[in-house]
Amino acid sequence: MAMIAHKCKDHTVTVVDINQARIDAWNSDKLPIFEPGLDDIVQGARGKNLFFSTDVDNSIREAEMIFLSVNTPTKTYGVGAGRAADLRYVEKCARKIAEVADSDKIVVEKSTLPVRTAESVKRILESNSQGRKFQILSNPEFLAEGTAMVDLEAPDRVLIGGDQTPEGKAAIQKLVDVYATWVPRERVITTNIWSSELSKLTANAFLAQRISSINAISALCEATEANVDEVAHAIGTDSRIGPKFLKSSVGFGGSCFQKDILNLVYLCEHFGLPEVAAYWNGVIEMNDYQKRRFSRRVISSMFNTVSDKKIAILGFAFKKDTNDTRESAAIYICKDLLEEQAQIAIYDPKVEVAQIQRDLGIDADNQYVSYCKDAYEATKDAHAILVLTEWDEFTALDFQKIYEQMQQPAFLFDGRNLLDLEALREIGFEASGIGKG
Ligand code: UDX
């Protein structure tokens, strides 16, 4: 929304939330999320044509177009628990719009939703329409965290789905006009509403599948003399395969991949397609295996016990350049190590201590976990270093100095294949990466 305000100066964008603290943060100097380049865009537009408010009702009344951008977490209760999307927030928004709108509206689904959710939103709005006309569009977001501003500024494509009726097409055109302010028209794809909803789930499933595929090969590389980075490079030069999303890692995380694939799996089962469901579920299973495999490798290399050993965790975010930890592999690895009674010392340049405590389900006074101001403090007297996020600053560390202040033998497990293992071994580290025999 900040990017739309930044690019379309003649439109007024109001972001509303019922959470006062969140809105206050958006109106303050410290925004509630860290994203490179976001501060400048928000500061440039805020108070001019970008507003943050808790006045939901009036904002709905004044708006011509309403974007639904609420959470659709995986359901934790009832039918489909653990897999289906929890749509209660979407439904509440639809009911709110139906209750307070006093003119025609275009309602745009921005949240990632299971296929045919637009239908439910439409039914709620239409059965309470009282003469007002509602058009529903699907406009999934493809930005990735950490590169959000660049992705929004120059997207590979913008996808807009809507009804193929004259009214639906007119609504689609209105949203196309917004994006066309800065996105080349040929990159704005329009489809029917179901194709648009399904495309988002499919895109995430394909991306995650590439990571699980290369991670599957990483296990084979570890068992042989092959090197997964070399294999990825070799296959990625085939233009039909392409080089992106082939970086083997300790496992993918983030708020989208797992949730969206689970959603896809649930949908396939719902539509009586168990083989298709099992196929996509394999992507998640491989990711779980990759995380588990990493913890096991750490423990077995360290003489089958990490009990009371200090282990430095470098990086807790699910990827670099974000403070987001949702589904981060680091959470799973740390939990595995805590079960083995290791002492873990965590350093991440952006993640807050309270967030780590929530993720690990521990109190502030937990004796097994400490939080460090930098990598040097985390690695002091440690038996091992685990690199779990590919923060650039980790490549610039003085590993000679770190080695000298560690217990010997000094182990290093690079869960991101970020560091030069040969150079580390020359210093004296017992260093290993992912997918390297
Ligand atoms: C993803 C999609 O990329 C984006 O289009 C969609 O809108 C939301 O979901 P995001 O979750 O922000 O974006 O990050 P992404 O860059 O896709 O990374 C997801 C996870 O995969 C991270 O944990 C990352 O470290 C991991 N990853 C990515 C790999 O392990 N290897 C790779 O080659 C690429």
Image (cartoon, rainbow, N blue to C red):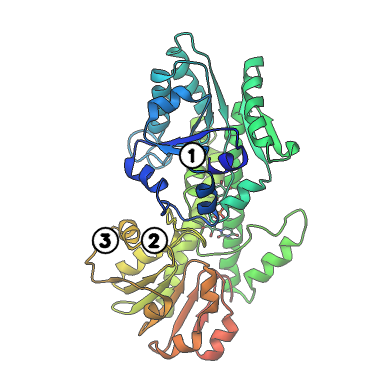
Q: Which of marks 1 and 3 is in front?
A: 3
Q: What residue type is labelled 1?
A: Asn
| Mark 1 vs 3: CB contact within 8 A | no
Graded by Cα atoms within 10 Å as few (under 14), some (14 to 19) or many (20 or more), the crowding at tag 1 reads: many
Give the distance between the C-alpha atoms of the residues marked 2 and 1, in whole angstroms. 22 Å
Disc 2 marks which residue? 331
**Residue 159 versus residue 82: which sits nearer the camera?**
159
Query: For numbered disc 2, what is the local secondary structure?
Result: helix
Q: Is residue 348 above or below residue 133?
A: below
Q: What residue type is labelled 3?
A: Ile
Graded by Cα atoms within 10 Å as few (under 14), some (14 to 19) or many (20 or more), the crowding at tag 3 reads: some
Q: Residue at x 67, y 47 (%)?
A: 154
Q: Is residue 67 above or below residue 295?
A: above
Query: For numbered disc 1, what is the local secondary structure?
Result: helix
Graded by Cα atoms within 10 Å as few (under 14), some (14 to 19) or many (20 or more), the crowding at tag 2 reads: many
Indicate which disc, 2 or 1, sits on the residue closer to the N terminus.
1
Q: Which residue lies furthest to the right in this view?
A: 239
Q: Which mark is residue 263?
A: 1
Q: What residue type is labelled 2?
A: Ile
Question: Could you tell me if residue 84 is visible in this image?
Answer: no
**Residue 26 versus residue 219: which sits nearer the camera?**
26
Q: In this view, does 354 lie above or below 96?
A: below
